[in-house]
Image (cartoon, coloured by chain):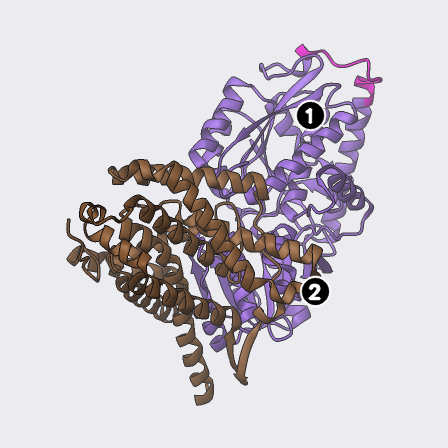
Chain colours: A purple, B brown
Amino acid sequence: MQSKSPDQARKFSARTLLCSALSLVLLASAQPGFADVPPTAKVNTTGLAVADTEVTVGQLHSATGTMAISETGSIQAEQLAIDQINAMGGVLGRKVKVIKEDGASDWPTFAEKSKKLLVNDHVAAVFGCWTSASRKAVLPIFEKENGMLYYPTFYEGLEQSKNVVYTGQEATQQILWSLDWAKNEKKAKSFFLIGSDYIWPRTSMKIARKHIENFQKGKVVGEEYYPLGNTNFNSLINKIKIAKPDVIFAAVVGGSNVAFYKQLKAAGITADKQMLLTLSVTEDEALGIGGENLAGFYSSMKYFESLTNDNNKKFVAAFKAKYGPKSVIGDVTQAAYLGPWIWKAAVEKAGSFDVDKVAAATPGIEVKIAPEGYVKVHQNHHLWSKARIGMAQADGQFKVVAESPELIEPNPFPKGYQ
Amino acid sequence: MSPSELFNIVIMQGFAGFSLFSVLLLMGLGLAIIFGQMGVINMAHGEFMTIGAYTIYLASHLSETFAPGLMPYYFPPAILLAFIAAFAVGWLAEWLLIRHLYKRPLDTLLATWGLSLGMQQVFRSTFGPKEVSPTLPDWLLGSWSPMAGLDIPINGLFVMALTLVVCAVVFLAMFRSRWGLRVRATVANRAMANATGIDTRRTDRITYAIGCGIAGMAGAAFTTIGSTGPTSGSLYIVDAFLVVTFGGAASLLGTIASAFSISQVQSIAEFFLTGSMAKVLTLSLILLILMMRPQGLFASKVRR
């Protein structure tokens, strides 16, 4: 359903190729040399914080509070991308200056800080948010004040805004292909769905259930949600043992995640006896869970640190050079890295920092240096990207065991799955 | 399902209940001592548990780096270290902060809450915002299966054994030692205890520190179950208070009874209902019982 016919794909990429080639020519003619920077009055007609040598952007993540665990990687990746962009001469000849704000894992604080960034600082773009709750809190402000938000996390979909670019996977991209893989490659027929009790796992599991029951003609033998922060899964594990599913399909997050995998292992449910496919374990989480508790389980993401393409080798090397050899890079960290690059490309395509022009120029933007491999932006401001399945290794890394042949079209409002 | 499978599930489900019981009890014990015996509402209880957990993490890290041969043995001494670390910090906190507030019990709530926020930031600055897990010795991992299809988690057994030991020691200390006598005297009547020559200030300090130390051990034991992050403590604090309040604040026996009943209801409900519904059911039951019996399961015998 989600992979397009090759014919259509060719047409689309041919068009975007033409577009980008054209814009390259245009850019080249508008900007023959570094010294010839377009005048500020021309590239900024709406009073953004753009000067002759500098453009200011905002970064809005939780550096403190519960979510700091997850958001640190995104903060680092965005900073790395901005540093690299500056080293290349900046955007439209202007160095990128970052104002960092701390959302402190508190959704009203996110709203307040985004208002500050847009109204007081007039930033040209904001890279930030992680949880859906924080995104929902800032969305009305970005729409009212007309800002640009680059949001890195894979999320539940059901949202689309001219003022947001979603650089992670939406739910169908992450779920459908991986379920098909489980069915076709692993002959899985029965699934046990487990999630933490909030919007993302519930929406994801709803989509998964529809896909399994209506499209795969498989069986869902259990569906359970546990409160965030729950650390006791023994009763659940007994229920899994009774249901004997072919696949445990899990979207447990945060501290619960670690407890869940440790207790699975302690209850004798290991990869040699039971297949498990998760939507919520990246290299970041694996660090906390411990590779020995995960080894052999599968994770569905679009990016793994172990990808061997040249873009990723460069990205991993640069990231580790900046943040230490022990740092790990998860899916969201990589998606966060894409944000500044997509913004740069859109600004250059539009020849302006004006939000409306940038938003209009965003669809069709291609990122050829993306560590996950080539991606492009869809009309709906989500990314076309590949789906991948990684198998957890004892050292906390993932071995990519499957990859979708084509880029998967983002579909935040999937028909038949609501 | 065959009868033997059913039997296995019943056994494992029973074990799940007891395992949750020991977790709750271990969580609540240190708090029961501080809250119950001294009337101090220790909001930083969870952070003292986190101290213990980070001590284990450090010990595992050091042992891995400097003495890989000792990896199988580091865990038990590290638990003692966790007690000592949390005890020391508790001692310091009492001396700097709590002792000035004994006459204003509600202010201890605010002060210890501030303390907990401060400690969280210290953890974050020291260990980083990401969650960590110690490398556990192999004998703590996996399951013990006396027969096919029956898997008893070893970490669960370990936590149970530790809870048993800690409980026994606390009870011995409380009812058979000089310290216990002084604590009970101070709780019963502070002025009178003072008059008979008991240094109640010193008693308070040691009691608070011991409560914190036990929290540290609990945190250490929980590294076998979950992970440790700067804010892990806040995950435990609600459950800990629930156990202590439900049991009746001043009664250690009440703490045990309450941990037992909460864990059994929770784990049985989880089995027959869903996880979230089980939590709802447990909390509503507790609420209902507390409405009828505000003093908790076991009424306190403290003279006010």
Position of A265 compared to B299: left or right? Answer: right
Residue A150's x, y, as percent?
60, 34
Few, some or many C-alpha atoms within 10 Å of disc 2 (few <14, some 14-19, many ≥20)? few
Q: Amino acid at mark 2?
A: Gly
Alpha carbon of mark 2 to alpha carbon of mark 1: how far? 58 Å
Task: Say if mark 2 contacts mark 1, CB within 8 Å.
Answer: no
Q: Residue at x 15, y 58 (%)?
A: B292
* Same chain check for tags 2 and 1: no
Which residue is at the front of the view, B16 or A19? Answer: B16
Let me know if residue A213 appears in the view: no
- For residue B13, above or below residue B91: below
Let me know if residue B222 appears in the view: yes
In this view, the residue farthest toward the bottom is B3
Which residue is at the front of the view, B303 or A354? Answer: B303
**Secondary structure beneath label 1:** helix
Residue A326's x, y, as percent?
71, 47
* Residue picked out by circle 2: B69
**Secondary structure beneath label 2:** helix
Q: Amino acid at mark 1?
A: Val
Q: Chain of mark 1?
A: A
In this view, the residue farthest toward the front is B197
Nearest-to-viewer mark from 2 and 1: 2
Which is the main secondary structure of the residues drawn in magenta? loop
- For residue B269, above or below residue A364: below
Q: For residue A40: magenta?
A: yes
Q: For residue A337: magenta?
A: no
Residue B77's x, y, as percent?
55, 61
- For residue B170, above or below residue B88: below
What range of the chain is rendered magenta? A28-41
* Residue picked out by circle 1: A347
Q: Chain of mark 2?
A: B
Which residue is at the front of the view, A195 or B172? Answer: B172
